[in-house]
Image (spheres, rainbow, N blue to C red):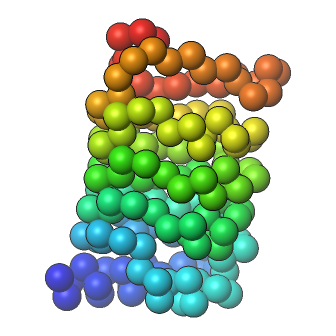
């Protein structure tokens, strides 16, 4: 566990020191987004355009995450234990790509339909049942659903 905490601290420090745009916390054994990171990343939160929380043990995402990181265009949440998303996900004004593959979704996350800027959704490897019809919120854009659903 100590190694995972040190990994998170190093990655956040690297982000802040470099003034980078990508926060990579993949594979850090996180079961929740650390609340201390909101303060730690406050000086660069408006510059972060992509966040990877892939391959952790996240069971949920807080409202504060989506209200803090308003400038993200890419969000990678693959390989977690997510079953649903908060409605605040719809507040991300420029999110283009979201990877939710290999989670525990049983129904399509309706919050995704509220994001006008979305271009790509990956829900592969979930247990979504029923039929699914996706229409691009902006007809001029190519909208892709990366998945292997029998009905797509």
**As displayed, is residue 67 above or below residue 102?**
below
- The answer to whether residue 48 of the structure is visible from this angle is no
Residue 143 located left or right of residue 101: right
Q: Is residue 57 visible?
A: yes
Which residue corresponds to the image point at 17% horizontal and 82% vertical from the top-left?
1
Q: Residue at x 42, y 9 (%)?
A: 151
Whether residue 130 is situated above or below residue 111 in the rendered picture? above
Q: Quarter-wise, where is residue 39 in the image?
A: bottom right
Residue 141, located in which quarter of the rendered image? top right
Residue drawn 70% across the image and 24% down it: 136
Residue at the (69%, 41%) spot, across then down = 114
Furthest residue in direction top, as rendered: 151
106 w.r.t. 50: above or below: above
**On the picture, is 52 further left or further right than 114?**
left
Residue 128 position in % (x across, y down): 36, 28
In front: 81, or 148? 81
Q: Position of residue 4 (x, y in %)?
A: 25, 79
38 vs 138, left or right, is: left
Q: Picture coordinates of residue 82 (x, y %)?
A: 35, 51
């Amino acid at each position: 566990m100590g190694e995972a905490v040190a990994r998170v601290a190093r990655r956040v420090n690297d982000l802040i020191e470099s003034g980078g745009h990508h926060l990579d916390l993949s594979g850090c054994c996180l079961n929740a987004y650390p609340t201390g990171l909101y303060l730690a990343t406050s000086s660069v939160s408006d510059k972060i355009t992509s966040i990877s929380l892939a391959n952790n043990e996240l069971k949920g995402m807080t409202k504060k995450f989506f209200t803090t990181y308003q400038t993200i265009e890419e969000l990678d949440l693959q390989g977690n234990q997510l079953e649903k998303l908060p409605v605040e996900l719809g507040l991300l004004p420029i999110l283009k790509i979201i990877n939710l593959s290999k989670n525990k979704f049983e129904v399509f996350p309706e919050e995704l339909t509220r994001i006008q800027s979305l271009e790509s959704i990956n829900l592969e490897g979930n247990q979504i049942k029923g039929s699914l019809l996706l229409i691009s919120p902006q007809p001029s854009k190519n909208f892709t659903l990366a998945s292997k659903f029998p009905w797509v």
